[in-house]
Image: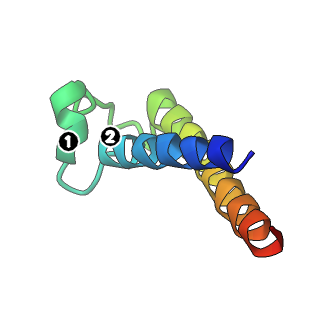
Amino acid sequence: MVTTLAILLILTSLTLVLLILLHKGRGGGLSDLFGGGVTSSLGGSSVAERNLDRITVGTGIIWLACIVGLGLMLKFT
Protein backbone atom coordinates (compact mmCIF):
# COMPACT_ATOMS: atom_id res chain seq x y z
CA MET A 1 0.00 0.00 0.00
CA VAL A 2 2.86 2.37 0.79
CA THR A 3 4.41 1.69 -2.61
CA THR A 4 1.13 2.40 -4.36
CA LEU A 5 0.72 5.71 -2.55
CA ALA A 6 4.34 6.65 -3.26
CA ILE A 7 3.89 5.99 -6.98
CA LEU A 8 0.61 7.94 -6.99
CA LEU A 9 2.36 10.80 -5.18
CA ILE A 10 5.10 10.94 -7.81
CA LEU A 11 2.59 10.88 -10.66
CA THR A 12 0.40 13.59 -9.15
CA SER A 13 3.45 15.73 -8.38
CA LEU A 14 4.57 15.64 -12.01
CA THR A 15 1.02 16.26 -13.19
CA LEU A 16 0.66 19.26 -10.87
CA VAL A 17 3.87 20.77 -12.20
CA LEU A 18 2.62 20.47 -15.77
CA LEU A 19 -0.85 21.77 -14.95
CA ILE A 20 0.48 24.78 -13.07
CA LEU A 21 2.82 25.63 -15.93
CA LEU A 22 -0.12 25.53 -18.35
CA HIS A 23 -2.03 28.19 -16.41
CA LYS A 24 -2.12 31.62 -17.93
CA GLY A 25 -0.10 34.05 -15.92
CA ARG A 26 0.18 37.79 -16.32
CA GLY A 27 2.47 37.44 -19.31
CA GLY A 28 0.94 34.29 -20.75
CA GLY A 29 3.75 31.97 -19.69
CA LEU A 30 4.09 28.49 -21.08
CA SER A 31 0.37 28.28 -21.80
CA ASP A 32 1.01 30.41 -24.91
CA LEU A 33 3.17 27.64 -26.35
CA PHE A 34 0.17 25.31 -26.42
CA GLY A 35 -2.34 27.77 -27.83
CA GLY A 36 -3.50 29.19 -24.52
CA GLY A 37 -2.71 32.72 -25.59
CA VAL A 38 -5.80 33.04 -27.76
CA THR A 39 -8.51 34.20 -25.38
CA SER A 40 -11.44 36.51 -25.69
CA SER A 41 -11.59 39.77 -23.79
CA LEU A 42 -15.28 39.49 -22.92
CA GLY A 43 -14.52 39.34 -19.21
CA GLY A 44 -14.06 36.31 -17.04
CA SER A 45 -11.95 33.33 -17.88
CA SER A 46 -12.54 30.93 -20.72
CA VAL A 47 -14.09 27.51 -20.35
CA ALA A 48 -10.72 25.88 -20.95
CA GLU A 49 -9.13 27.93 -18.17
CA ARG A 50 -11.94 27.06 -15.74
CA ASN A 51 -11.60 23.37 -16.60
CA LEU A 52 -7.84 23.61 -16.13
CA ASP A 53 -8.47 25.18 -12.71
CA ARG A 54 -10.81 22.33 -11.74
CA ILE A 55 -8.39 19.64 -12.88
CA THR A 56 -5.54 21.35 -11.02
CA VAL A 57 -7.54 21.57 -7.79
CA GLY A 58 -8.64 17.94 -8.08
CA THR A 59 -5.08 16.79 -8.68
CA GLY A 60 -3.93 18.90 -5.73
CA ILE A 61 -6.48 17.25 -3.45
CA ILE A 62 -5.31 13.78 -4.53
CA TRP A 63 -1.68 14.90 -3.99
CA LEU A 64 -2.50 16.14 -0.48
CA ALA A 65 -4.37 12.93 0.37
CA CYS A 66 -1.34 10.88 -0.74
CA ILE A 67 0.96 12.90 1.50
CA VAL A 68 -1.33 12.54 4.52
CA GLY A 69 -1.88 8.84 3.84
CA LEU A 70 1.83 8.15 3.47
CA GLY A 71 2.60 10.10 6.61
CA LEU A 72 0.05 8.16 8.65
CA MET A 73 1.14 4.81 7.26
CA LEU A 74 4.81 5.46 7.91
CA LYS A 75 4.08 6.71 11.42
CA PHE A 76 2.04 3.68 12.48
CA THR A 77 4.05 0.92 10.80
Amino acid type for the residue under numbered disc 2 = Leu
Q: Measured from the top left, where is residue 54 in percent x and y?
A: 60, 40
Pointer 1 or 2: first along the chain = 2
Q: Measured from the top left, where is residue 67 in percent x and y?
A: 64, 62
Residue located beneath label 1 in the image:
30
Quadrant housing the N terminus: top right
Residue at 57% from the left image edge and 37% from the top image edge: 55
Is 23 or 3 nearer to us in this picture? Answer: 3
Is 66 or 27 nearer to us in this picture? Answer: 66
The type of colouring in the image is: rainbow
Residue at 45% from the left image edge and 36% from the top image edge: 49
Residue at 27% from the left image edge and 31% from the top image edge: 36
Is 17 or 77 nearer to us in this picture? Answer: 77
Q: CA distance from mark 1 to mark 2?
A: 6 Å
Left or right position of 38 against 58: left
SS at mark 2 in the image? helix
Total tally of numbered discs in the picture: 2
Q: Is residue 24 visible?
A: yes
Left or right position of 14 against 29: right
From what the image shows, is residue 68 above or below residue 25?
Answer: below
Left or right position of 17 against 74: left
Q: Is the Cβ of the residue at disc 1 closer than 8 Å to that at disc 2?
A: yes
Amino acid type for the residue under numbered disc 1 = Leu
> In which quarter of the view is residue 14 placed?
top left
Left or right position of 77 against 28: right
- Judged from this view, the residue extending furthest toward the top is 35
Q: Is residue 53 visible?
A: no
Residue located beneath label 2 in the image:
22
